[in-house]
Amino acid sequence: MTRLAHTPLSVLDLSFVASGSSGPEALRGTLDLARHVDGLGFDRFWVAEHHNLASVASGAPDIMAGQILAATERIRVGSGGVMLPNHAPLMVAERFKVLEALYSDRVDLGLGRAPGTDQLTSHALRRRQDVDPGDDFLDRLKELMLWDSGQWPADHPYRTIQVMPVDVKLPPILLLGSSGYSARLAAQIGVGYAYAHHFAQHDVLDAMLSYRAGFQPSERLATPHAILALAVVCAPTDEEAEYLAGSVDLAHLRRARGHYGPIPTADEAAAYPYTEADRAFIRRNRDKVLVGGPDKVAQGLERFLDTTLADELMIATAIPDMAAKKRSYTLIRALQAVSAAA
């Protein structure tokens, strides 16, 4: 039996808007996908927060999480994540305590340090909050945890405020990261950690292993739990997977040039007039995308598990063809049964 056989598998979906499609269709697609992977037995389904991007339909992970929880039966649902610099910690506490009250033990609160958008939109999100415009993530995180614990200093003006529902604790908190900072912070405060390998520039081994090495047990989490988020496109054959992944390749190429439009179809990607420089960029970027048939994907996932010691894999399949996306997750889930029998 291999590591893959007993490693929890989860899903990250960003409600990408596909070329020729619409925002409402993207949001409904996320709900459809959540129901599909819930039936397959995946462990979690996370949605993200991005703003002012024509390619992403949702900037409200709390609202999407509530819709997904209502549409599914057993899968854990959460934010991957709430971008804490954009929100008053009290508001985050209220919204996620409501979700936890309605769907006990099925909710995750993933928190990110970045604004999830450009500078101007970030300013618009925060301009009516009386805060230092610098990086105040740690202060906001401490405040959020105090809203949960209620252990304010005796002279603190907030100590008389109750977060409703008062008899519900916040769901598990996990920190998201694409650098070493969040890994060290998650280890220090004793919460789960999710590393975004699908877009990070930082060394994945440094982030994942330093989190595990530095982990300090807490009331929230007794042992480390490291999630590795990976971009994966799986199809019945390597050739078909390569064709489908053309959407991912062209989308990454366009984003690198500052174009954040809808995700191109595989047909559009196949017809695109790539230059040699474009193809070189795509080859380099393929280090962050695992593409292939079941055997190739299984080998890649096992390699990541062996090197990073991840406790869980979170798969992001950012292709616009919903039928092919569902099939990709079906094939990935089936790899566990194959691994268990090996």
Image (spheres, rainbow, N blue to C red):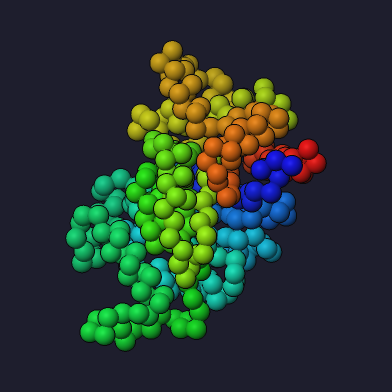
Residue 315 visible, this orientation: yes
Name the side, left or right, on which 331 lies relative to 262.
Answer: right
Q: Nearer the viewer, residue 87 or 209?
A: 209
Residue 123 appears in which quarter of the rendering? Answer: bottom left
Residue 279 is situated, as x and y percent measured from the top left of the image, at 47, 18
Q: Residue at x 71, y 54 (%)?
A: 41
Quadrant holding the C terminus: top right
Residue 334 is situated, as x and y percent measured from the top left of the image, at 74, 42
Q: Residue furthest front?
A: 213
Quadrant holding the N terminus: top right
Q: Residue at x 57, y 60 (%)?
A: 77
Q: Residue at x 64, y 51 (%)?
A: 8
Q: Is residue 259 above or below residue 22?
A: above
Residue 24 is situated, as x and y percent measured from the top left of the image, at 54, 51
Name the side, left or right, on which 290 lies relative to 217.
Answer: right
Q: How many marks?
A: 0
Residue 43 appears in which quarter of the rendering? Answer: bottom right
Q: Residue at x 53, y 49 (%)?
A: 227
Q: Residue furthest right?
A: 341
Q: Nearer the viewer, residue 12 or 254?
A: 12
Residue 50 visible, this orientation: no
Q: Nearer the viewer, residue 221 or 232?
A: 221
Name the side, left or right, on which 286 lies relative to 72.
Answer: left
Residue 158 is situated, as x and y percent measured from the top left of the image, at 28, 81
Q: Is residue 257 above or below residue 43?
A: above
Q: Nearer the viewer, residue 148 or 276?
A: 148
